[in-house]
Amino acid sequence: MKTFLVIFMICLLANAYAIPTSKPDIAADSVAQKTEGFNPNTATQEYLSLLTPAQKSKSDSYFEGKYWLTLWDMVYEIVIAWIFLSLGLSRWIKKQALKAKRINVQNLIYIGCYLLFAFLLTLPINIYENFFREHQYDLSNLMFGNWFGEEMISLGLELVFGCLVIMLLYIAIRRLKQNWWIWGGIIAMVFLIISLFISPVFISPLFNKYKPLPESKLKEEILSLARANGIPTSEVYQFDASKQTSKISANVSGFGSTTRISLNDNLLNTCTPAEIKSVMAHEMGHYVLNHIYKMLISFGILIFLGFVFINWSFKKIINRWGHKWQINDISDISGLPLFIVLFSLYMFAITPINNSIIRVNEIEADIFGLNAAREPDGFASVAMKLSTYRKIEPGYWEEILFYDHPSGKARVLSAMKWKAENLGEIKP
């Protein structure tokens, strides 16, 4: 049920690594030392062979399980929409909302109640997917109370931003009739930009503490890398992700004056300087290559097309079942569950397109990072650590359909190809 709101928060996606913590792998160091008679394909296989059969099996199980969860999540959303529409929950909420005099207040009441009921109905599957399953695969450090507390913060944000944006959408629908989707798309784009701007300063600190990275040689190397690539920052921030997860991560977030380079404490505590620099160079690549702006345009177009699909399909469905559900047209707020499930179906159908847009940006940032940091083995060893939560060696179509980042194998091979062309610069 969160799919509709998630697309509005696309700009908050982590264009980042998210990698389980581990100590530097001695075996990986031995692979890195080999330069004589170097072959990229052979070196890639040597990196891949560092993963034990048990580790690979666990990784594959976790990631492949998410394929099915994506399908069942969509089925679950359809069932919830049926509960609202066919069992009368939507009509009951609207009846309560109609006690207010102004239509915008009525809509706000309905939207708020809808989001609360949707949260409660999705809570069981949410607890399984994002708490128990994450602990099952040793990817979470949160106790249930802390996890639920963060869910309450997320719910609060959904209520504030969701009520506002959906209310504005319904104003556009009422006033513009058939052309509502044009201004609806513009409203979504404006919200994306605002979210992107305020996230580093107001949203992210609700979940983690951010503070400047202490002065060190590593910090100076990161800032030097930023200056060399035209990134206007004089600070690097760290945040305490270890309270939530065993993964390492870094990101370049924000928009304009709020642009911020951040890395988490797991990255600092468990990775070598070469690995850290390779990750930070990748993140800087997103900024230098203007991926934020490109993704805004790309996802903005997809949102417009999604609203066109809703405008067409909503009419078709209401013509058949509208009388039973007591929904007159798309401007009727009691049709919100249908509106959202249609958008969710649209997003589900274009998942490969979404993934490909992000994956292309990630590939570009990978190449940029290799050229900027010049740490191919650091990059390769970090890519291998993705294997705890991401299948390291998928099939061709599997990667196209389900991966929003390059696979571990693709990243290692990319690093080894770069190394092969720059052997004279690689320190033994």
Image (tube, helix red, strand yellow):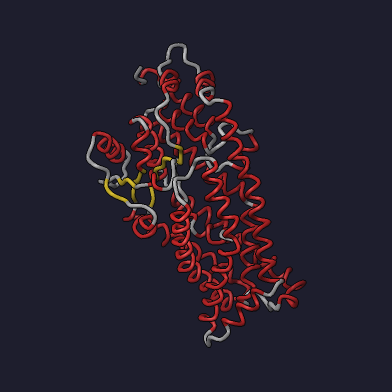
> Which residue is drawn at the image coordinates 50% and 20% (left, top)?
43
Between 248 and 259, the residue placed more toward the observer is: 248
Q: Is residue 404 above or below residue 378?
A: below
215 lies left or right of 299: left
Q: Is residue 64 above or below residue 380?
A: below
- Residue 372 shows in this picture: no
Q: How many discs appear? A: 0
Quarter that holds the C terminus: top left
The quarter of the displayed image where residue 423 is located: top left
372 lies left or right of 17: left
Between 174 and 201, the residue placed more toward the observer is: 201
Residue 407 position in % (x across, y down)? 54, 35
159 lies left or right of 121: left
- Residue 272 shows in this picture: yes
> Which residue is drawn at the image coordinates 50% and 64% (left, top)?
188
The quarter of the displayed image where residue 157 is located: bottom left
Residue 104 position in % (x across, y down)? 52, 80
Residue 31 position in % (x across, y down)? 45, 19
Between 218 and 116, the residue placed more toward the observer is: 116
Quarter that holds the N terminus: bottom right
Q: Is residue 406 above or below residue 99?
A: above
Residue 404 position in % (x across, y down)? 55, 43
Q: Residue furthest bottom?
A: 101
The quarter of the displayed image where residue 301 is located: bottom right
> Which residue is drawn at the image coordinates 47% and 24% (left, top)?
416
> Which residue is drawn at the image coordinates 47% and 51% (left, top)?
13
Q: Is residue 403 above or below residue 384?
A: below
